[in-house]
Image (tube, rainbow, N blue to C red):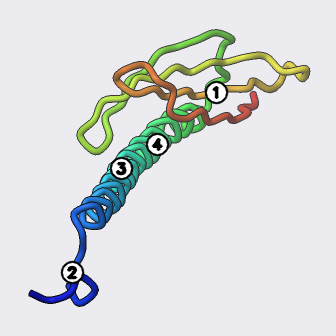
Amino acid sequence: MKPRAAWRGFTLVETLVALAVVAIALGAGLRAAGVLTDNAQRLSDVVAAQWCADNELTALRLARAFPGVGDADFSCEQLGRSYAGKLITRPTPNPSFRRVDAQVSDADGRPLVTLSTVLSR
């Protein structure tokens, strides 16, 4: 039989520690991949919501009508998803101008984007 000092290999404790380190690293990697996927989806939603808000504000500009003060709801579909929006029209210190905010939310009601413009008479 060989003396104990000549044995080669890893002990059971060393192997278990190495497996634990690998498991923690893989778990962290999966979590990071999940966060990246969520961020990509959120970015897609924000871009589509911005298109919706921009379309509504552009339609107001093209109508060339001076908007009244108040709130109005609208809906929009972009990239196969539906978005709910609200046009909020407020007076400004100069009576010849109105401030219009277009707020767009996702299907769950979470706000995604708000765009503002000023329209004149």
Q: Quadrant of the C terminus?
A: top right
Q: Which residue, given by chain and number where applicable, does mark 2 sit on?
A: 9
**Image point (30%, 30%), residue name:** 82
Depicted 90 relative to depicted 105: above or below: above
Question: For this rendering, which residue is in front, 42 or 83?
Answer: 42
Q: Is residue 2 left or right of residue 105?
A: left
Counting residues from the start of the chain, the first of labels 1 and 4 encountered is 4
Q: Which-is-in-front pick, marks 3 and 1?
A: 3
Q: CA distance from mark 1 to mark 4?
A: 16 Å
Tell me residue 115's x, y (percent).
Answer: 62, 36
Counting residues from the start of the chain, the first of labels 4 and 2 encountered is 2
Tell me residue 24's x, y (percent).
Answer: 35, 55
Q: CA distance from mark 3 to mark 1?
A: 37 Å
Mark 2 residue element: loop
Number of numbered markers? 4
Mark 1 residue element: strand
Mark 4 burial class by Cα count in 10 Å: few <14, some 14-19, many 20+: some
Q: Which residue, given by chain and number where applicable, does mark 1 sit on?
A: 101
Q: Amino acid at mark 3?
A: Arg
Mark 3 burial class by Cα count in 10 Å: few <14, some 14-19, many 20+: few
Question: For this rendering, which residue is in front, 86 or 10?
Answer: 10
Q: Quadrant of the N terminus?
A: bottom left
Counting residues from the start of the chain, the first of labels 2 and 3 encountered is 2
Q: Amino acid at mark 2?
A: Gly
Question: For this rendering, which residue is in front, 57 or 79?
Answer: 79
Counting residues from the start of the chain, the first of labels 1 and 2 encountered is 2
Counting residues from the start of the chain, the first of labels 3 and 4 encountered is 3
- Mark sitting on residue 31: 3
